[in-house]
Image (tube, rainbow, N blue to C red):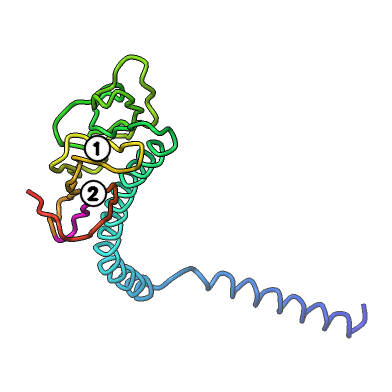
Amino acid sequence: MNEEVITEMACNHAYQRMQLLRLLAQQGFTLIELLVTLSVASILLTVAVPSFSTFIQNNLLTTQSNSFYSALALAKSEAIRRSSPVTLCPSINGTSCTGGAIWSSGWLVFADPNNAGVVDAGEEILQVGAAFSGGNIFSGNMGRVTFTANGFSMGSNGTIILCDSRGGSHSKAIILNNQGRFRSETGTGSCG
């Protein structure tokens, strides 16, 4: 072999050996790098977790109040569409009204042509509202809401308040007047 080839082979061998040594020298993170990374991660989690918990609670309240709000809108629009009374009442079993004013266990929207306020044989159930999760309480001063053919809710004037563990400052109140108008307010309810 000539001298140039031998020199080139020696250089290639030395280069490959250096690359192998570099790979062997890189073994991972140092202890200091690892501790700094864990410290930064723990600080970020300490700041983020309480805010995320509040975010979850607020979204749960909003979702639950919107669910009931849409049930009221359905009852009113169906009463007008059918030209006949439609009632919304608390229900535990999804087939009959339970009476009382605790709405967090569920509710029914049903066609109520005889305006009795209870589900009679042959009356159509339009919607069954599911019980609320998260231990939230939804109650008020109304045991039922009946919308007449013109959309009014005569005798159903009242407020239903949704509360969680944080109390009245975070409550959601749905307020209904006799003209069938309803609105939502935040932080005005009294829980307890």
Residue assigned mark 2 = 176
Q: CA distance from mark 1 to mark 2?
A: 9 Å
Residue that appears at 67% across and 74% down = 17
Q: Which residues are drawn in magenta?
A: 169-174
Pick the front one: 76 or 12: 76
Residue 145 — which label?
1
The part of the image, by quadrant, that contains residue 32 is bottom left
Q: Earlier in the sequence, mark 1 or mark 2?
A: 1
Residue that appears at 39% across and 40% down = 74
Residue that appears at 22% across and 60% down = 186
Residue that appears at 65% across and 75% down = 19
Q: Is residue 58 above or below residue 142?
A: below
Q: Is residue 50 above or below residue 165?
A: below
Which type of secondary structure does the marked residue at label 1 adopt?
A: strand
Q: Amino acid at mark 2?
A: Leu
Q: Amino acid at mark 1?
A: Val
Quadrant of the image containing the N terminus: bottom right
Q: Are marks 1 and 2 in contact (CB under 8 Å)?
A: yes
Image spot of residue 160 (x, y percent)? 19, 46
Q: Is residue 53 magenta?
A: no
